[in-house]
Image: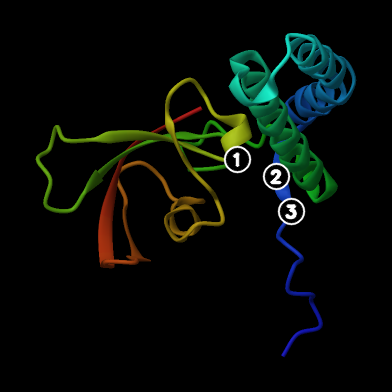
Amino acid sequence: MTNVPANQTEPTKLTQATHDRLVAELEDLTTRGRVEIAQAIEAARALGDLSENGDYHAAKDSQGKMESRIRQLQAMLKHVEIVGETGSDDGTVTLGSIVTLRYDGDDEDDTQRFFVGSIEERQGDLHVISPSSPLGQVLVGQSGGETVEYQAPGGLLKVHIVAVER
């Protein structure tokens, strides 16, 4: 039994650059964003009957999405750990690596590329593997050419690390 509260989560690991970007996004949403949404709602209210007012409903929907993003950013930034650009050029998987994987049983050329890190650190359209996920835990510290196994919801999976990039 631990004394850790059930609602305490593991800190989100972010680079300083991503942390700064998210803080700026939060600041923008809580200032300019809220003012613009309030103005859009007020302008739509002035148009009359709210029950059939598409502008009003669209503005309220946008307000809900923006407030949800604000809460998400606040929670993430409350429990954040700033990490350095930990990428090493020795070919091992670290936070910020891009890995090419092939699942056991797949064809040699049937590979997938993933970014290892936080979804907020994502590189382009690559899928993200969290370093705290079962797959992420076994990948970190491994090198290209190695094979790892991890427990997935569907059973034990074997993955071949085809390449590691920075």
| Nearer the observer, 5 or 47 | 47
Q: Secondary structure at mark 3?
A: loop
Asked whether the beta carbons under mark 2 and mark 3 sit within 8 Å of each other, the answer is: yes
Quarter of the image with the N terminus is: bottom right
Q: Is residue 71 above or below residue 120?
A: below
Asked whether the beta carbons under mark 1 and mark 2 sit within 8 Å of each other, the answer is: yes
Residue at horizontal 59%, vertical 20%?
52
Q: Is residue 73 above or below residue 32?
A: below
Q: What residue would you read off at disc 3?
A: 11
The amino acid marked with disc number 2 is Lys
Residue 108 drawn at (x, y percent)? 12, 38
Left or right for 164, reference 73: left
Q: Residues within 10 Å of mark 2 (few under 14, many from 20)?
A: many
Residue at horizontal 55%, vertical 51%?
131
What label does residue 13 carry, if any? 2
The amino acid marked with disc number 1 is Ser
